[in-house]
Image (cartoon, rainbow, N blue to C red):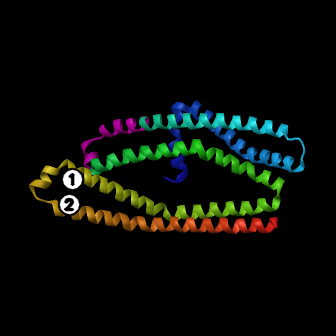
Amino acid sequence: MNSRAVYRRALSFLKPEAELAISLAAAGVGVGLAQLLEPIIFGKVINALTSKISFGNYLLYWLALGIFNTILSVFVAVMADRMAHRQRVSVMEDVFARTIRRPQTFHAKKGSGKLVRVILSGAETLFMLWLTLLREHISAFVGVICMVPVALYLNWKLAVVLFVLAAVYAVANWFIIERTHGGQAQVETHHQEIAGRLVDVVNNVTVVQSYVRFSEEKKALKEMTTALLRAQYPVLTWWGILSVVTRVASMVALMTIVSIGA
């Protein structure tokens, strides 16, 4: 399943509260537009102050926009959080109900530890996806889309620099995600195996004690954690490279902006 299919599947869980989800998305659009307009109006106020002309109307616009942004932000923050928590619990209950109805062969093959890991981590991942999408990503996406024509209108030279910086960010993130997708899947598999091992051993601790398998179980867990770190380190290295690349790109963009301004 590719990334688009995953997102579509994740968003489909919000259908029971589709009206609220659409309202939150619309509010996120409003927040994004308000965040875009606020610095523009602030710049108008500063220009009016330096030019010693009346700026009362700009202050009123700024105040009204601030109130509008605050109301929408509070609505999105509170309602998105509540809805994400409700849907996380709902998904967990649904998956749990379907899991306990599966035949014994399924549970014997998967292992109880792996199933618990999948249920808990899956519900938590969906929760964070819903929350960040409704709280941050929609408003940020709208702001970026609308910022391009506005920036080109205000100062096309600086806009080109920012556009190139955004393109570098997008390409770098896409490249790193493609490079680490398979590795991160292996990491999750190792996490599931470790969780399954821990649950199985703890559930059968009397058997372990009876056969005095303490050193064997410890050695087996050590091998699994070593394999986990072996798979995790390359992924972390790529994300570290991304952090350095984006930081250097930001520095170059800032130097370019200063040079153009000078």
Q: Residue 42: x and y, percent?
A: 78, 46
- If the image is split into quadrants, where does the C terminus sit? bottom right
Kindly identify the amino acid type of the residue bearing the numbered disc 2: Glu
Comparing 40 with 222, the one in front is: 40
Circle 2 is placed at which residue position? 217
The residue positioned 52% from the left and 66% from the top of the image is 240
* Numbered range of the magenta stretch: 90-108
Prevailing secondary structure class for the magenta stretch in the rendered image: helix
Vertical placement of residue 234 versus 26, above or below: below
Which residue is under mark 1?
Answer: 201
Front residue of 44 and 210: 44
> How many numbered tags mark residues here?
2
Q: Which amino acid does label 1 sit on?
A: Val
Location of residue 212 in the rendering, given as x and y in whole percent from the top left corner = 11, 59
Where disc 1 sits, the SS reads helix
Can residue 131 be seen here?
A: yes
